[in-house]
Image: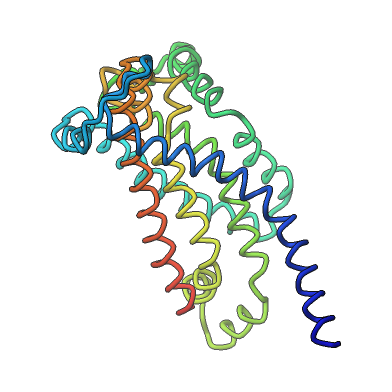
Amino acid sequence: MKKKKKASMEDKMFRQYLVLVLPGFIIFTIGLIIPLLLSFRYSLTSWDGMTAEKPFVGLKNYIDLIHDKDFRDTWWFTIKFTIGNTIIQNVAALLFAVALDSGIKAQKVYRTAFFVPCLISAVVVGFIWLKMFSNVLPALNDWLGTNFDFLLFGKPNTVLGGLLIANNWQWIGYWMLIYLAGLQSVPAELYEAAKVDGAGPVKRFFHVTIPMLAPSITICVVGITTGSLKVYDLLVSSTKGGPGRASTSVIYQTYTTAINGRQYGYGSAMTVTLVVVLLLVALIQVKGLKSKEVQA
C-alpha cells in the first residue's frame, strides 16, 4: 500500500514538473533547435531563398568559406571586438563594483546611472554614438577651440575603438551589478581574518575578493564573449559595416549574404559556423572558469 502511495506521489510530482518544463521546452525547440536544423539543411544547398528548388551541393559552401577572404576578415574584426569588450567590460565593471561596494555616498544614484544605458536598444545606442562622434563632439571641439579628431566611425583604423566605446558605455553597468551582487555576498569574516593575518587591501583583493567572485567572473566573461561574437544591432545604425568593410561582423556579413545577396545556402553555412564557434567558446570558458571556482 505504501509503495503504491509513493508511486502515485512520484507520478503526480512528475506530471507537475512536466507541466512546468514542457512550455519552455516547446518554445526552445521551435525557436532554436528547429531553425538550427533547417539552417544546417540549407547550408548543404545552393538555395537562393526565392525558388522552391534547393539544389544539393554537399559541403561545397563550407569549403568555399575556408577560401573566402571577406569571411575571414569579418572573423578577424569580430574577434578583435570580442577580445576588447571582454577585457574592458570585465575590468571596468569590477572596478566600478568595488568602488560602489566601498560605501561611497549616493551609491544608488551611481548604480542607476550606470545601469540605465543597458535598457536602451543597441540600435538606438549606435545612433546616439553616431551623432556624438559626427555632430556633438565636433561642435564641442569648435566651441573649445581644440582640434581633436572625433570622427571615429569614419576611418578604418579608428572604427573599432568607436564601437568599443559605444558598446562598453551600454553594457558596463549591467555587468557591474553582477559583480556588485557577488561582492555583497562575500562574508565579512574572510576580510577580518585576512586583516588579522596582516594582509593589506591589495592582498585582500587578490586573495579573498577575486576567488570569492569566481562564479560572477564566469557569468560575466561568458556573457560578454558570446554577446560580442553576435554583434549586429549596434552596427546597423552606426557604421553599417563600414567604412569599406572595416567593421563588418560575422552576423552582419551573414545577413547581407543571405538577404541582400540572395545566397541563403551560403549564408546558412556562415550561421552554422558561428553557432559552432559560440558553443565551443562558451563550453571552453565555462569549463576553465568552473575549475577555478572549485580551486577557490
Residue under the image location 62 percent in, 41 percent down: 114
Left or right of residue 185: residue 256: left
Left or right of residue 175: residue 24: right
Quadrant assignment for the N terminus? bottom right
State whether residue 148 appears in this view.
no
Residue under the image location 73 percent in, 66 percent down: 14
Q: How is the image coloured?
A: rainbow
State whether residue 175 appears in this view.
yes
Q: Is residue 284 above or below residue 264?
A: below
Left or right of residue 67: residue 157: right
| Residue 289 % position (x, y) | 43, 66
Q: Is residue 221 above or below residue 266?
A: below
| Residue 137 % position (x, y) | 47, 18
- 69, 1: nearer the viewer: 1
- 27, 256: nearer the viewer: 27
- 97, 68: nearer the viewer: 68
Residue under the image location 84 percent in, 88 percent down: 2
Count of marks overlaid on the render: 0
Q: Is residue 259 above or below residue 277?
A: above
| Residue 227 % position (x, y) | 46, 42
Left or right of residue 31: residue 206: left
- 283, 149: nearer the viewer: 283
Q: Most extreme residue toward the left, as rendered?
A: 67
| Residue 246 % position (x, y) | 27, 25
